[in-house]
Amino acid sequence: MTLLSIDRSTDVSSVALAYGDGIVCRVLEGAAARNADWPLKVQELLEAKSLSFCDLDRLVVGTGPGSFAGIRGALSFVQGLAIGIRAKRARAADDPIVYGLPSTLALAQENGVTAVVGDARRGLFWVAAYEGAKTVAELHLVTKEELPAAVPPEAVVVTPDGARIGAVLGELFSSRFLGNRAPSAERLAQLALTHSELLVPEPLPIYLSPAVRT
C-alpha cells in the first residue's frame, strides 16, 4: 500500500507518504503553508522515493474542521490526482481512491481520552472527544458556559486554535490543558493504515454550521 496523506486545516500544513515499512513527512508553516506552490512539495516528496503520482494507491485528506480554503484546496488536489490514477491504472469508478479522516482525530493521544476544542467564532466553541481512535463525543458546538460540561472529566484538552482560545482553555481546564497542537499528516497516515474502517470515501469538509441559502 502506497498512501499519501495531506492536512491543510491549520496554518501548519503537512504531507506524508506511507511507502514500504515507513512514513516520511514534510511540514510547511506560516507563509510557506499558504503559498500556491505547495503541491510541488508533494511532488518532491514522491520523487525522493522514485515515485510518481500514479504509483499512489490511496489518498487521504484531513477534513477539518479548520481552514475552509486549505481543506478544499487539498481535496481538490487529490481529486484531480485520482482522475489521473484511474486513467493510468484502469481503476474502476466504484473503487475509491480518495478518503477523508477528521483532522481532530489526528490530535487524539493514543492512550486515554482527549478532548479537541476549537474556535467556532461568534462566541462558540467546537468540541470532539476520542479515546485513542474511538470517538467518545461527536463534534458539536457549545458556548463558553457549556464547555466544561462538554469535555469528559477524565480527558486532557488540546486545541489547534491556541492563539485565539488558549487562554480561555487554560483558565477552564488548568493542568488538563496541554496547549496548542496542529494535526499531522503523518498521524493521519498511521490511522489510515491501522484503522481503515474509519476512512470516509469521497469526503467533504466538515462544516460546523449548515450552509445558508440566499
Image: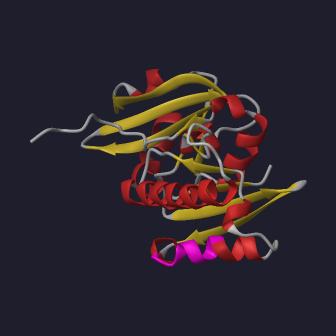
Residue 24 lies left or right of residue 113; in this view the side is right
Instruction: Determine the residue located farthest toward the left in the rendered image.
Output: 214
The image shows residue 149 at horizontal and vertical percentages of 45, 21
Image quadrant containing the C terminus: top left
Residue at 48%, 39% in the rendered image:
117
Residue 188 lies left or right of residue 171; in this view the side is right
- What range is drawn magenta here? 35-42
The image shows residue 109 at horizontal and vertical percentages of 70, 38
Q: Is residue 206 above or below residue 146?
A: below
The image shows residue 88 at horizontal and vertical percentages of 65, 61
Locate residue 76: give its quadrant. bottom left
Residue at 77%, 54% in the rendered image:
2
Question: Is-magenta flag for residue 32?
Answer: no
Residue at 36%, 39% in the rendered image:
207
Determine the main secondary structure of the stretch shown in magenta: helix
Question: Is-magenta flag for residue 41?
Answer: yes
Residue at 62%, 39% in the rendered image:
95
The image shows residue 44 at horizontal and vertical percentages of 69, 77
Residue 42 lies left or right of residue 210; in this view the side is right
Q: In terms of depth relative to the viewer, which is nearer, 42 or 143?
A: 42
Residue 158 visible in the displayed image: no
Residue 137 visible in the displayed image: yes
Q: Is residue 153 above or below residue 48?
A: above
